[in-house]
Image (tube, grey):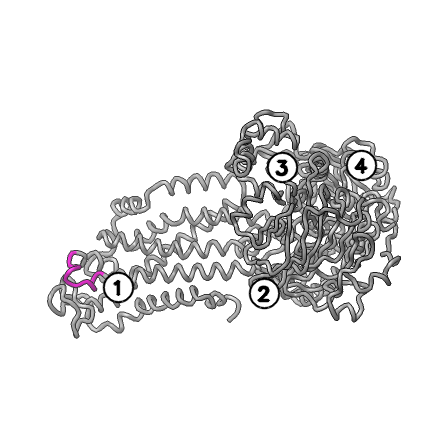
Amino acid sequence: MSSAVRDPVIRVEGLSLDLASGEPVVEDVSFAVGQGEIMGLVGESGSGKTTTALALLGYTRAGIAVRGGSVQVAGNELIGRDGSALRGLRGKVMSYVPQDPGGALNPSLRVGDAILDVLRAHRSTEASEDSVRAALRRVELGADPEFGRRYPHQLSGGQQQRVTIAMACVCGPPVAVLDEPTTGLDVLTQDRILAELTRLRDEDGMTMVYVSHDLAVVAGMADRITVMYAGRVVESGPAAEVIERPRHPYTRALVAAIPDVHNPRALQGIPGVSVGVGEWPDGCAFAPRCVHAQDRCLEAVPSLDAVGPGHGVRCVRWEELVGHQPRADGGRAATDATGVEPLLGVEGLSVVYRGGRLDRPAVDDVSFAIEPGRCVALVGESGSGKTTIGRCIAGLHQPTAGVIRFDGVPLPGAARSRSLDQRRRIQIVFQNPYESLNPRRRVAEEIERPLRVLRKLGQADARREVGELLERVRLPTRVMDRFPGELSGGERQRVAIARALAPKPELLVCDEVTSALDVSVQAAVLELLTELQRELHLSMLFITHNLGVVACVADTVLVMDRGRLCESGPVARVLSDPADEYTRRLLAAAPRLPHGALS
Amino acid sequence: MSGRLRFLRSPGGAVGVAIVLFVLAVALFGPYLAPHDPTAPIGPDAAPPSSTAPLGTDELGRDVLSRLLYGGRSVIALALLATLLAYAVGMSIGLLAGYSRSKVDPVLMRSVDVMLAFPPLLFLLVLIAGAGTSTAVLIIGVAAIQAPAVSRVVRTSTLEVSVRGYVEAAVARGERPVAVIRREVLPNILAPVIVDSGLRFTYSILIIASVNYLGLGLQPPSSDWALMVSENREYINLNLWAVVAPAAMIALLTIGVNLTGDAIARSLGRSYVPRAVRTVTPS
């Protein structure tokens, strides 16, 4: 791998962007990407990575303006060009693949016509059905000659994303900017898209900038990685260097936060929350969350120092910290629970949706058990029926057939038919913390409600316990009087967990609780759940699509494929020696860090 | 200003509330300030403004100003009652249909579609032709025209909100459906309902005014803004004010209510779509 960039196709120098109010969003960002390289641009939400990526297209979102710097793409300076000049370059010189293909494709345009539009704009002589078919063939959508006549809603998420990639590549631009192209897709589809992008790069020598919040996804395909925090580049260098020998405390924390299937270890979240625009401190923006921070970190913004060939880091203490790797201890100690009476027993559970297909139930004859104090992970792609099982256990969905036993007693289907005690002992935490808290209710009232309904506490007792619960999920008691809209995603999910813990449950159903969160926040939430489980001797059903998360939190894993349980067993055994073909495919597709990282 | 009155801080909200208060004050206190009896002639027919009749007289020589001061109560009270009734019925139907997700939903919604298929004014005219004209018939008729649309807006919002985690958490706690609807669903569908209620109230005013104008609602000699427009329209070139003043009051009320509704909706919307997320650091 080349260390310094020769003949860069993309050269960004001192790029700064401001909000209309004058607050900086991106500050003095410089990087270069060589011909045929893939650069990963990594950061949490609010780090300025998307703003920087859009600047590579000569585009700024409403309310954001370029203050200074230069962006050169294939020899064209973009800053200062007018709209029509930029339009001539977009699609021809640099193209864009958006995050949400469902929202990005025009729903009333056949996908073939959408691709044809791009051709008409730049290469009108080649605008023909044949070119469209060729473009679709290159993203492996050519099997059906009529594919171009379909509408976006007739395609799967993965196919939609391939279409946007075909649109981005049809005019053969030297540069493509990809904005989280696989976020929201399941693991197998993500793996196929990543392979596709790597192939396009190898065949056409395209230069790519891949924006992501997930270092593990980027690690597998990028040649160089640029890590951004609070609008600045904090570390940048060859991918292997950055992942295996991260120099900046933030990069190290990010690496430590990634759940890895093949190297399970206790996850470490990054304390605190990411600083927003307009809240940047004077010195190093990461200092308030950094375990190595000293007073001098806050004096001035550190310079980007060269630590190796093509590897720069923005930290005043990087030399002192070399060799000071974060703790990376082994995964969970396996607990043996044979011979214990299960707390929850699911026997022959089937669910057929009304109006759905009878021949393919959402859940098909699933049986498993959860022993007290154990964490069972339920893994599968979207549509595998895993969420439906969780909802049946919580009393939100009536099973079509089968029995759910709790503490030896069969549970009625609907929550309303269950006894108060049964309702109290089973609690659920939902996937999306942005929708799981009542936006018109303060945090304290939200947590008080289950205390009053399920434990019949009085107002004063309930209020006292709210404080203890907030402490338990590591939130300051002052959030009590806040509305959910005033909290970050991670904080909201902690409130949702506190609400679920309030009635002192014995079984906690966690439905994709981290999938809407940034990787570093995910690690912090998982860390919290693991500790709570140990302290309170909770049993957990942990529903997720992320095998790395399973490796870090669960004792037993159940793998689901299209409503059926295809494999189950202890986590260590299933992940190291999967018996089922589908489990093997899931494992192979899971993004992973190179083996040297942090070991 | 905090909490519920936050909407007054926006210019639209402040202006809207000022206009509504002005029109309501005219309707409420007007009769006490009226210089003349609204039903007795005081001078020549359709005379232009003079010192005794600042807005001139109408086609029967009655004082336009006095009639204007008396004429607001009926239209506002009727429109308000009709709108409230429409909301009571429409919201119940919408919440029931949206929250139950059972067989009730299609039955209720198809009936609503049937109601919506009638041209509103025609429906009201047929009703008046059948049941005769009275305030009760007017209120029920206007409410029946409005309720289906209300139930649709409420149902759509309810469908959207009732799959959220906080609603499901309440269901899993085993709370009674009425409690879930009141505590979890209702507060979160209010924003669209309130904007909509401004429009509905405005529309009620216009329907009642239209019916009165057509002479099928309130009957002469009652003083009513819409009736005044209708009575004086032929003499508009003799005394312009007899038509323009009552029409302007109806227009002002409509505009004021709309501005207020929009401002309230915007202020409600903000608490769950924050411009900038304030953050706290876990200790």
Question: Label 4: few (<14), some or many (≥20) within 10 Å?
Answer: many
Q: Give percent across and percent down for residue A128.
A: 54, 29
Residue B71's label in the rendered image is 1
Q: Mark 4 vs mark 1: same chain?
A: no
Most extreme residue toward the left is: B44
How far apart, in angstroms, are the residues tagged by discs 4 and 1?
Answer: 78 Å
Chain ID, mark 3: A
Taking the spot 70% from the left edge, 54% from the top edge, the residue there is A44
The three-letter code of the residue at mark 2 reads Gly
The three-letter code of the residue at mark 4 reads Ser
Question: Label 1: few (<14), some or many (≥20) within 10 Å?
Answer: many
How far apart, in angstroms, are the residues tagged by discs 4 and 3?
Answer: 46 Å
A266 to the left or right of A473: right
Chain ID, mark 2: A
Residue under label 2, please give it: A22
- Eye-nearest disc, 4 or 3: 3
How far apart, in angstroms, are the residues tagged by discs 2 and 3?
Answer: 38 Å
Question: Label 3: few (<14), some or many (≥20) within 10 Å?
Answer: some
Residues at discs 2 and 3 in contact (Cβ within 8 Å): no
**What is the span of residues highlighted in magenta in the rendered image?**
B234-243
The three-letter code of the residue at mark 1 reads Gly
How far apart, in angstroms, are the residues tagged by discs 4 and 2?
Answer: 56 Å
A116 to the left or right of B50: right
Residues at discs 4 and 3 in contact (Cβ within 8 Å): no
Residue under label 3, please give it: A172
